[in-house]
Image (cartoon, helix red, strand yellow):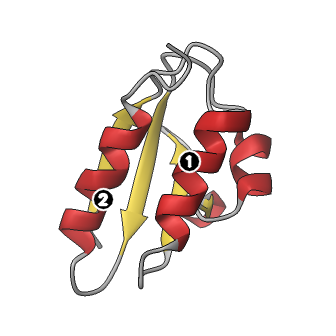
Amino acid sequence: MPERTATIASRVGLHARPAAIFAEAAGDLDLDVTIARQGEPADDAMDAASILSLMSLGAAHGDVVVLRAEGEGADAALDSLVKILETDHDA
């Protein structure tokens, strides 16, 4: 299963606006994408398209998260989602 790590760039972390932008992008994909904090078991990963899951993740500025997806186009999809997380949407 392809996976990528990303460092949260938004100054307020993955809350409100950055979470909404990310959840919408993940929801638009024809793939199931999961997100977890780095170091957590893959079984504890949450649905990346769920804003509630993203908010409960509690990822702060500078935290590293792991994205996973499976299926056709997963690598490109994960690359695009990493760019979203590594952009400061609060600037």
Q: Which residue is mark 1?
A: 21
Q: Is residue 12 left or right of residue 28?
A: right
Cα distance between the residues tagged 1 and 2: 15 Å
User: If the image is split into quadrants, where does the N terminus sit?
Assistant: bottom left
Q: Secondary structure at mark 1?
A: helix
* Mark identifier at residue 81: none
Name which residue lies at 52% across and 21% down: 10
Q: Amino acid at mark 2?
A: Leu
N-terminal of the pair, mark 1 or mark 2, is: 1
Q: Position of residue 36 (x, y in %)?
A: 56, 49
Up the image or down, 2 lies above or below 11; here it is: below
Q: Amino acid at mark 1?
A: Ile
Name which residue lies at 22% across and 86% down: 72
- Looking at the image, is mark 1 or mark 2 nearer the viewer? 1
Q: Which residue is mark 2?
A: 78
Density class for disc 2 (Cα within 10 Å; few <14, some 14-19, many ≥20) is many
Name which residue lies at 53% across and 50% down: 22
Name which residue lies at 71% across and 33% down: 15
Q: Is residue 2 left or right of residue 65?
A: left
In-front residue for pair 58/12 = 12
| Any part of residue 34 in sight | no
Q: Position of residue 79 (x, y in %)?
A: 24, 53
Q: Secondary structure at mark 2?
A: helix
Q: Position of residue 7 (x, y in %)?
A: 40, 27
| Any part of residue 33 in sight | yes
Q: Position of residue 62 (x, y in %)?
A: 48, 16
Up the image or down, 46 lies above or below 13; here it is: below
In-front residue for pair 25/82 = 25
